Image: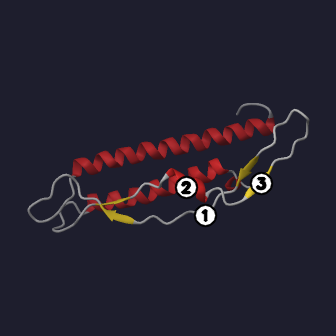
Amino acid sequence: MAFSDIPLFGMLRERMHWVQARQGVLSQNVANAHTPGFTAQDIKEPDFRNVLKSTTSGTLHMTSTRAGHMSGSTTSTSARGDFSTRNAPDSETSSNGNSVVLEEQMMKVAENQMDYQTATTLYSKGLGMLRMAVTGRPS
């Protein structure tokens, strides 16, 4: 079984892809902060319900090896989705038509960094739980 077959890792991977794509868009906003007529862009955050639906396409049935085990199923994940940018002007527009406010962009970059750190920490903790389940000892 590959890690991509575990829904938790698939959703975390999707989140990291979204954060990476958003970082690129935010850096373009900062780079064009003084370009006349430039409108700030952002990427719409994926809706959790849609991500959950996209990661539950297949079914993997679990097998009970003892009478006390609970029956259940888990699902496989889908491939990374594409993210589209949208105009997201900041709170001000300058006289030359530029709508990028550097302070607001830096706040979005910091938020984006925290989202990425959260996703990588959860990914690491998930791997640690799998390692402990396989080896019987914490890493």
Marks counted in the figure total 3
Amino acid tagged 3: Leu
The residues tagged by marks 3 and 1 sit, at their Cα atoms, a distance apart of 17 Å
Q: Position of residue 96 (x, y in %)?
A: 11, 65
The residues tagged by marks 3 and 2 sit, at their Cα atoms, a distance apart of 18 Å
The answer to which of marks 3 and 1 sits earlier in the sequence is 3
The residues tagged by marks 2 and 1 sit, at their Cα atoms, a distance apart of 11 Å
Q: Answer whether labels 3 and 2 touch (C-beta < 8 Å).
A: no
The answer to which of marks 3 and 2 sits earlier in the sequence is 2
Which tag is nearer the camera, tag 3 or tag 1?
3
84 lies left or right of 15? left
Mark 1 secondary-structure assignment: loop
Q: Which residue is under mark 1?
A: 79
Q: Position of residue 52 (x, y in %)?
A: 58, 53
Residue placed most toward the observer, 85 or 103: 85
54 lies left or right of 99? right
Mark 2 secondary-structure assignment: helix
Residue in the image at 87% along x and 42% along y: 64
Residue placed most toward the observer, 125 or 74: 74
Residue 1 appears in view = no
Please say if 66 is above or below 63.
above
User: Which dot marks residue 60?
Assistant: 3
